[in-house]
Amino acid sequence: MTEYYMERMTWKEVEAVIAEGVDAILLPIGTTEQHGPHMPLDTDCVIARGIAERAAAAAEEAGLRVLIAPTLNVTLSWYHMQYPGSMRLSTTTFLQVFNEVCESLHHHGFRNVIVVNGHGGNVAALTVAVNYYLETTARCVFLLQWWELAGDI
């Protein structure tokens, strides 16, 4: 089975994938927050990673090579801080982290960065982040949110 998760690879393996030609890298973004008393704090991360993994497998079946970057798992959840275990970044810090992660990926040769967002609380900031990144670097980052993929039942 092909390894999709970049963090499970050595740097030499990542270098080889880039040299062979990687079509895209998926950047799962969730958060660490409460989801009621019955669900784990990483629910949004699990969703984003799951979609990314299925997309990478589907891409491979279509003859494309896609990697999955490490999940950004602490993002915008200031409104859940009354629940133990919830974590948050300020919007300013989140925007800076997003920018630096994208810069790191582009630095290493990943030209098609696709964000897979699993947390509704990130929508506004991610919209600003991808637009600001394009404005300041002239490089696109594509934004995918699972609820935009979901069809009517």
Image (cartoon, grey):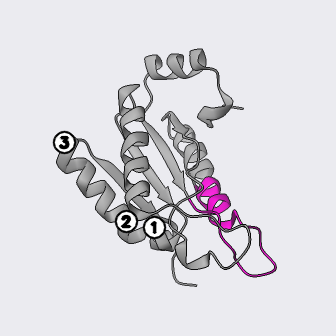
Tell me the residue at 61%/51% (across/down).
54
User: What mark, if any, has residue 138 been given in the picture?
Assistant: 3
Image disc number at residue 40: none
Looking at the image, which residue is at 36% across and 46% down? 99
Residue 19 placement: quadrant: top left
- In the structure shown, which secondary structural element does the residue marked by tag 1 occupy? helix
Where does the magenta region start and end?
30-51
Mark closer to the chain start, 1 or 3: 1
Q: Position of residue 21 (x, y in %)?
A: 43, 24
Q: CA distance from mark 3 to mark 2?
A: 19 Å
Residue 121 located within the stretch drawn in magenta: no
Query: CB of mark 1 within 8 Å of CB of mark 3?
Result: no
Structural crowding at the residue carrying mark 3, measured as other residues with C-alpha within 10 Å and reported as few (<14), some (14–19) or many (≥20): few
Is residue 49 on the magenta stretch? yes
- In which quarter of the view is residue 123 placed? bottom left
SS at badge 2: helix
What mark, if any, has residue 125 been given in the picture? 2
The image quadrant where one finds the C terminus is: bottom right
At label 1, the amino acid type is Asn
Left or right of 45, for residue 107: left
Question: Left or right of 145: which side holds 40?
Answer: right
The residue carrying mark 1 is 122
- In terms of depth relative to the viewer, which is nearer, 20 or 93? 93
Q: Secondary structure at mark 3?
A: loop
**Picture layout, residue 151 above or below residue 108:** below
Do labels 2 and 1 touch, CB within 8 Å?
yes
Q: Residues within 10 Å of mark 1 (few under 14, many from 20)?
A: some
